[in-house]
Image (cartoon, rainbow, N blue to C red):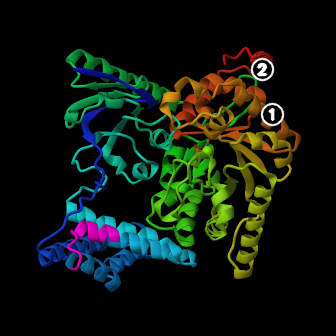
Amino acid sequence: MISIQGKGVSTGVAIGPLYYYQRAKSTIVRTTVADTEAEWQRFKAAQEKAIEQLGELAEKARVEAGDEAALLFETHQMMAEDLDYEESIEGMIKDDQMNAEAAVIDTAAVFADMFAQMDDAYMQARAADVKDVSNRIISVLTGAVQGGINSPVPVILAADDLAPSETVQLDKSKILGFVTEGGSGSSHTAILARTMGIPAIIGVGDQMKPEFEGREVIIDGSTGHVIVDADEDTKKYMMEKRAEQIRVRKMLEELKGKENVTLDGRTMRVYCNIGSPEDVSAVLSNDGGGVGLFRSEFLYLNCDDYPSEDYQFEAYKKALSDMGGKEVIIRTLDIGADKQIGYFNMPHEENPALGNRALRICLNRPEIFKTQLRALYRASAYGKLGIMFPMVTSVWEVKEAKKMCEVVKKELTAEGIPYSDEVELGIMIETPAAVLMSDRLAKIVDFFSCGTNDLTQYKLACDRQNNDLGRFFNPHHPAVLRALKMVCDNAHKNGVWVGICGELGADLELTETFLSIGIDELSVSPRSVLPLRQKIRSINLGEVKDKVLEALLTDEISV
Ligand code: PEP
Ligand code: MG
């Protein structure tokens, strides 16, 4: 039996075979070939295979998401057999004696560069396509397995780390749990694991060995414990623990349909965070009161190209209609930092967390922003929609974003397309600037939603992705809690409501604090709704409020 300690970031016990995440190899070996005709034929065979794969993907997309989604793969098929593209590869192989892999990668670089130089945004976006197509051909040439899970049974998935784009594309029915060498608790992969209710452990470092592949592993997401080949006693203990967790879950079920109200009558709205319309079923089955944060960027991460207005409209409409009139707050695109998307072709940044991300990208590239806002307003006719903008620092940014909403509404009116007039507009409070400007910002929005993951990062100047920073990344820090109080005070003076949609919202040690400072809504992963309801229902706010507020001001809270 081998025992490994990591950090649990999504609770629950899981047992199953260990499986290492397969990532397509990207190192290309360059060689000089003697038989250039044979090498050319090798390329032609790989090209044909790639075109066949793309055809299958197009069919799958047509069935699952309609003609428009299929079109993307069909465009990739055309690119793979484009005559100029093929001629360039042929020249490199036959004239320069390059091996096929090197010829494909070099041709891809030339074509991507050419597209990127073009003025038209649509053509610029083709740069990512040509790279994608070329990577597919190279994978066929090298025999690399594309990222994913090639197992007939569900597994505990091990990886060095997983990017959000890799996590969203995984077949969730195949995953019992996650174990990663790196990562951090507030990374988006950890957030996704919690949303999906899958146990997850990060930061096991090199304790996890490739030779464990296929062996039985037990993980405990609450303690961060990973056990390989458990002995009988340990296995029995862990199975009992799992049974106990299931029993507690069942007990919590009895709270369904009950109010989130303290013993002395203060109510709190408890909403859920989701990443796709499919997560709505978990919101409803856990009795969430609404959706407080729909991370719309996961739609973008799941696509190989900019999602069209229609594609987004269908996704937002589905979330709104499935929620049956309960409020759904959709956050506009929040990419950048750890959420990178190839087809955005963003230049390399030294400090991506402080770079061109979220609302900044939307304001700099209004055509992308407008497409999303049109989809959102069109969807607003199908439920109760709120829209919020991430990573705000200044009043002018919000005014500019709101102006774009007006432009979109005017366009839709002119086109006779219905939308709701009651869409609430809010912003995320994630930066120290937004906290300090919350008195002014409150005058131009309907609500604030505090993103405590980023707020902690920026308040404490502490990278949320860096697991080594451990105790320095402390969302309980008075600087964070006082910021939340300041935001609540400024909001309430202006008749604006305040929520928390960062991971801190589900932290039961702080529920009394949130109630005391006046937070109106907590948006948490679906599985956290009932434990939070239980906590709220156990609190007598009148008894604790003064003490909590005094502690906040006098630093009795540990720093
Ligand atoms: C946050 O920063 O707290 C937040 C909710 O947004 P994200 O975690 O997606 O950055
Ligand atoms: Mg954030």
> In the picture, residue 17 is in which quadrant?
top left
Vertical arrangement, residue 336 with respect to residue 495, above or below: below
The quadrant of the rendering that contains the C terminus is top right
The amino acid on which the numbered mark 2 sits, given as a three-letter code, is Lys
Check disc 1 and report its element: helix, strand or loop: helix
Q: Which mark is residue 149?
A: none
Q: Is residue 214 left or right of residue 378?
A: left
Residue at mark 1:
486
As drawn, which residue projects farthest toward the right? 493
Decide if residue 404 is in sight here: yes
Q: Is residue 496 left or right of residue 66?
A: right
Q: Which mark is residue 545?
A: 2
The quadrant of the rendering that contains the N terminus is top left
The amino acid on which the numbered mark 1 sits, given as a three-letter code, is Met
Upstream in the sequence, badge 1 or badge 2? 1
Q: Quadrant of ligand 1?
A: top right
The x, y position of residue 532, in whole percent, is 59, 30
Q: Residue at x 50, y 32 (%)?
A: 253
Q: Residue at x 51, y 38 (%)?
A: 465
Q: Residue at x 19, y 37 (%)?
A: 214
Task: Decide whether residue 140 is among the magenta residues.
Answer: no
Q: Is residue 237 left or right of residue 498?
A: left
Near-viewer residue (397 or 413): 397
Is label 2's Cβ within 8 Å of ligand 1? no
Q: Residues within 10 Å of mark 2 (few under 14, many from 20)?
A: some
The x, y position of residue 433, in whole percent, is 76, 43
Vertical arrangement, residue 436 with respect to residue 168, above or below: above
Near-viewer residue (183 or 90): 90
Near-viewer residue (171 or 119): 119
Is label 1's Cβ within 8 Å of ligand 1? no
The x, y position of residue 78, in whole percent, is 35, 80
The x, y position of residue 226, in whole percent, is 32, 26
